[in-house]
Amino acid sequence: MIRAAYGIYESARAKLGNKWAQLSLTSQFLLLSSLLVLASHGVLGYWVSKQIESGIKLDVATRDALFMESRLSPFLQELATSKDLSQESANRLDLFLAGDRKSQQLEETKVWNLDGKILYSFDKSIVGKTFPLTDRLRGAAAGQIKIEFNDDPSLDEINPNSNTNQTFFDIYIPIRSSNTAQVITIAEFRQDATDLETKISNAGLQSWGITGLVSLGIIAGLYQLVVKANSVIQTQQKSLDERIHQLSKLLVENKSLKNKVQVASHRSAENSERHLRRIGSDLHDGVAQLLTIALLKLETVFGKSRSNSQDYVNVHGLLSDAMREIRDMAAGLALPEIDTLNFQDALKLIIARHERRTSTHVDTAYLEECPPLSNPVKLCLCRFVQEGLNNAFLHAGGVQQKVTVMKTATEFSVCVSDKGPGMKTHVANEKRKTLGLIGLQNRLESLGGKFEVFSELGQGTSLSAILPMAKQG
C-alpha cells in the first residue's frame, strides 16, 4: 500500500517536473512569482484584516465603556459605603437605562460587587446571587476595563438561555469612588455587535480588495520586467551564439594554420638536418681528404730532411690541427644514423661519442619504456642533448654530467645537467644559451615545447627540453 502510494507520488512528481521543464523561462517566472506574491499578500491581507477587526472592536468597546462609566457612576456611589444597592437606586437605574437600552443596543446590564454578587440586572431573577469570580471580573476589580467578544451567548454561565442568535460583546467596567478613586463595584454591559460585525466585514473586504489589486499590480509589473529581460537575454544569446560560431570557425582555421606551421617546421627541421649532414659529409669527404693528401705530399716534398726541418714540423702541425677540427666539425654536424634507431638508442650513441671525444663520463637515467617520437622531435631532442653535453664539457669541465629522460601524464622532458661552478639563473639565461642552444630553443618552440635553464653558483647548471605528450608522436 505504502509502495503503491509512493509510486503514484513519484509518477505525479515526474509528470509535473516534465511539464514545468517544458514551460518557457518567462512562464516559469510568472507562475512562480505569482504564487509567491499571492501567498505573501494573502498572509499580509489576513493579518491586516485581523488587525482592523481587532482595532475596530477595541475602539468601539472602549468608547462605549467610557460612555457608560460616566453615565452610571453617579447612581452607584452609595456602594462606597454600602454593600447592597438600594431599591431606590435600582429603580432609578431602570428608568435611566430604559432610554439607553435601545439606543446603545444593550442586551444585558449587571452590577457586581467585588465578591461576585449581582447587585443589579435587567434579569431580576439573578439579583442577589453570588457567582465565582471570572478572570474578567478580577481584572475589572483591579481597575482594568475588560472586553470580551463572543458570537455564542450560550457560553454565558449565568444566563445561558439569553438571545442565542446574535453576535455580542461584553464590557466589564470598574466603577470608582468619586472621593477615594478606589474601585467600589463592577458594571457589566452586553451589547449587540451585529452592526459592528457588518462594519468589520466591510473593512475586511476593502482590505482584501486593496491587497488583491496591489498583488495584481506587482505581478503585472514583474511580468513586464521579465518579458523585457527575456527579450534582452534572447537578443544577447543570439549575438553570443553568433560570436561563438565565428570564434569556432576561427579556432578551426587557427588549428589548421597551426598544423600547417608545425608541418612546415618539421619539414624545415628535416631539411636543415639533411643540409647539416651534407655539409658534414662534404667536409669529411672533401676538405678532410684534401688535407690528408696535403700531409702525404708534405712528406714527399721534405723527404728525408723532414726530421730536421722546423718548417716541416710547423706545417705538419697546422695541417693536422686543421684536419682534426674539420673532422670534429663534421662529426658535430652529422649525428649518428638515428633514423632507424629509437630515441634511447640514439641517445646512447650520442653519449658514447661524447664520452669518447672528451674522455669524460655521463650518467644517465632513462625511461623503462620510451614513447615513440616523430623524426623531427627525435632529431631536435638529440641535437639538444648533443649541444647540452658540449656546453657541460666547455663550461663545467664535464663534472658529473647527467642526461635524464622523464615522462608525466602531460609532458615528456629531457634534462642535461652538470655539477660545475654554475651561475645565477638570470646570468645563465643570458650567457649559457649559445648560438646552437638558441636555435634548439626556436626549434623546440616551433614543435610546441619549451626550453628552460636553471643554474646557481656552486650548484651546477641544468638545461631542460619539455614537450607536451600530444606532440611526441
Image (cartoon, grey):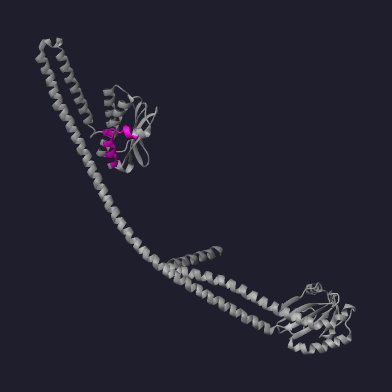
Task: Return the residue nearer the eye: 191 or 157.
Answer: 191
| Quarter occupied by residue 412 | top left
Q: Which residues are magenta?
A: 429-445
Q: Quadrant of residue 362?
A: top left
Residue for point 76% across, 85% down = 107
436 is within the stretch colored magenta:
yes
Q: Is 470 placed left or right of 32 in the picture?
A: left
For the point 17% across and 30% down, the residue is 281
Q: In what quadrant of the picture does the N terminus appear?
A: bottom right
Classify the position of the C terminus by image quarter: top left
Q: Residue furthest front?
A: 179
Q: Is residue 402 above or below residue 17?
A: above
Indicate whether residue 384 is drawn in magenta: no
Q: What residue appears at the point 89 percent right and 84 percent down from the top-left corner? A: 86
Determine the main secondary structure of the stretch shown in magenta.
Answer: helix
Residue that appears at 52% across and 65% down: 9
Q: How far across and how far down the image is residue 13, in percent?
A: 49, 65
Give the quarter of the image for residue 314: top left
Q: Position of residue 78 (x, y in %)?
A: 88, 81
**Camera sees residue 107:** yes
